[in-house]
Each structure stands twice: as C-alpha cells, then as structure tokens.
Image: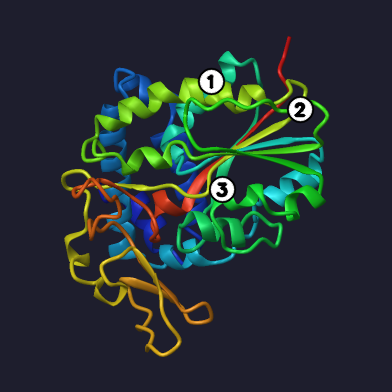
Amino acid sequence: MSTLDRELLDKLTQPCPRLPEIEDWLLNHVWTPDRFAECGSLPSTYLKSGEKLVNDRETLLTSAADSIFDELTASSPNPTSIAGFLSKQPDGGVVIFDGCSLRELPCLLALAQISKRPVLSVCCGRSALPSSTERFIGERLGFNLPVVGPSKLVQRQELRQQGISYHYFQRPNEAQTISEESSAIMIWSRFPDLTFMDSSANSAEMYDGIWDAFDLVWRNTVQAIPPERTVLITSDHGYLFLGAGLSDQSLEGKDRPLNGKRFRKFPADEALPENSPHIWVDGTRRIGAIKGRCHNRPQAPSASQSLYRHGGISLMEVLTPWLVLGPMEG
C-alpha cells in the first residue's frame, strides 16, 4: 500500500480536480521507460510492479476521494478526438491499437525512436464510457458514427466522404499497402486486444509476448504510413490487469445488476439500478458499469481465469495513450 504521507493526503482530500495529477503520475512516474529499465526490461515484471502502484493509489482514491470516478466520467476539459486531430492535420495518419494502454508507452516510444519519428506530444486520451470498442467508435471518434465494431467501418461511407482512407487490420502479421495519394489515413489494428482472448491470458507472462509482437505490428501499420505524415498513436480503451492482490474484494457481488458483466445495457422495461459507489449509471443511455477493479465473470471465451479485462470504469481502462509523432527524420 502507498505510504499515506501529508502531501499525498492533501492531494487526495482537497476539493480540487485530482485527475490532472493522476495523469501526470501515470505518464511520468509509473508507465515510463526508466521504470521499465529498472524492471530489467522485462515486460511482465514491469506490468506487475506498476499495477501494484496503480492499485494502491486507486484504492486510496476510492477510500478517501471517490469523486475520482466523477472526474473520470465527466466531460474532459480538453477533449481529445480523432476528428479533432485530423481537422488540424488534414493529411495526417492515425493508428488505433485496439486495447493498447498507458502501460505500453515505453514500447511505443522505443519504436518511434527506431523509426526516426520525433515525439511531438505524449498525453492521455479517453475511452468511451463504458470502456468498449463499439462505444468508442460511436461516441469518441468524433465523426457521428453509429455504435458499431471496427470491421464494420470498412463498408461505411462516413469516413470516405470526409476524405479519410480507412484500413482495418485483423491479425498482427497482416500487411496492407497504404496509398501515398490518400489524404487522411486511419488504421485500426485489433492488436493487442484480441490477444487477451487467448487461453494464455491467465498470466502476467503473456504480457512479454505482447511487447515482442509490437515490433511486427508497428512495421505493418505505423511504418506503412508515408514518412512525411504526422501520426497519432492512440487506443479505444485500456484494460485492467487482475493478478494476485489486484482485485477489490469489496466489489464482489456488486455486479449482480450487471449480470456479472463489467457493463450492461438495460432494456426499457427493466428498472435501472441506483448510481452508487460501486456502479455508474447513465439513465439517458440506460447503461450501467462497474467502478474499479473487480475480477468478476470472465469475458474471454476460452480463458476462464482471464486476468485482462475492460468494459468498466477505472483509471487503466478509461485513460488511454495519446502519442503524436512527427514526420520521419533523415
């Protein structure tokens, strides 16, 4: 557990926004290249030690200042959207790594350096609420799209009508040709999210394989974008890692109104649960989602003890990487 000193206590209890300080802490103290190196450059060790830090801090926040969930679910004062980025970079490129989290930033930064693309900015984006892929497309891309899966965007006209060339990558080893004549370019890669559905998703060591595979995925996606383009690297949602000691026992059973899921859409003829310290409810959309870290019913079809989850509301699900890279140098 984090040491509750006077400075941290003041940060937790003073009536002021807490999320900016939390974002700075995650970006500059937890999920950093330096801390990755301190962990012997072993992804699974870095994952477990970083998750303990985040879980300790999130537990303190939940106990002493649960308004952090209000901040996570409130409208961002500086909203980030793909549409907003492309309005400023009309010939830019966007790569969405499905399920990529703030944890992977050291890997992305190292690949950017190898690619000779300067880092222009690193900050936090936001998932949709709840943190699902389909809702991100409908509510966070910024193109007035319906709530659909990323593969469905290949057939839709909305992006083409705005001069955006859209490419969907289902597999890590998939390669596609990106035309240099395209105006704006958007690439959606199902990596690493589909990896979490594998039977190996019940251990921290699976994370080592994710980092190993990122090199190939990066070459097939980011490196396929013409080198003179500015590129945004982001994600639709993060995820929880629920290894030993990283699940909030007080949340056990609280997901019953959600039928054991991390979020649920309620039919019109069913009463909504009340907004509570454990469940967030959007009465307009009739959606409920679990708040915090709970190892509830697995989402993965073949891994009954899957440790990698998303769909709820927590720091590591809602806050996502927002990495802008300049044109390739040299």
> What type is the residue that disc 3 sits on?
Ser
Instruction: Residue lying at the far front in this picture: please name it.
Output: 155
Left or right of 44: which side holds 220? right
Q: Nearer the viewer, mark 1 or mark 2?
A: 2
Residue 291 in percent (x, y) is at 35, 65
Residue 237 in percent (x, y) is at 48, 49
Q: Which structural element holds mark 1?
A: helix
Question: How many neighbours does mark 1 have within 10 angstroms: few (below 14), some (14-19), or many (20 or more)?
Answer: some
Question: How many neighbours does mark 3 have within 10 angstroms: few (below 14), some (14-19), or many (20 or more)?
Answer: some
Residue 81 in percent (x, y) is at 66, 52
Labels 2 & 3 near each other (Cβ < 8 A): no
| Camera-side residue of 60 and 172 | 172
Q: CA distance from mark 1 to mark 2?
A: 22 Å
Q: Can residue 270 be seen in the rendering of this structure?
A: yes
Lower position in the chain sequence, tag 1 or tag 2: 1
Q: CA distance from mark 3 to mark 1?
A: 26 Å
| Camera-side residue of 314 and 197 | 197
Dot 2 corresponds to which residue? Answer: 179
Left or right of 301: which side holds 108? right
Residue 117 in percent (x, y) is at 66, 20
Q: Nearer the viewer, mark 3 or mark 1?
A: 3
Q: Which mark is residue 111?
A: 1
- Residue 7 vs 102, above or below: the answer is below
Dot 3 corresponds to which residue? Answer: 151
Q: Which mark is residue 174?
A: none
Lower position in the chain sequence, tag 3 or tag 1: 1
Q: Which structural element holds mark 2?
A: loop
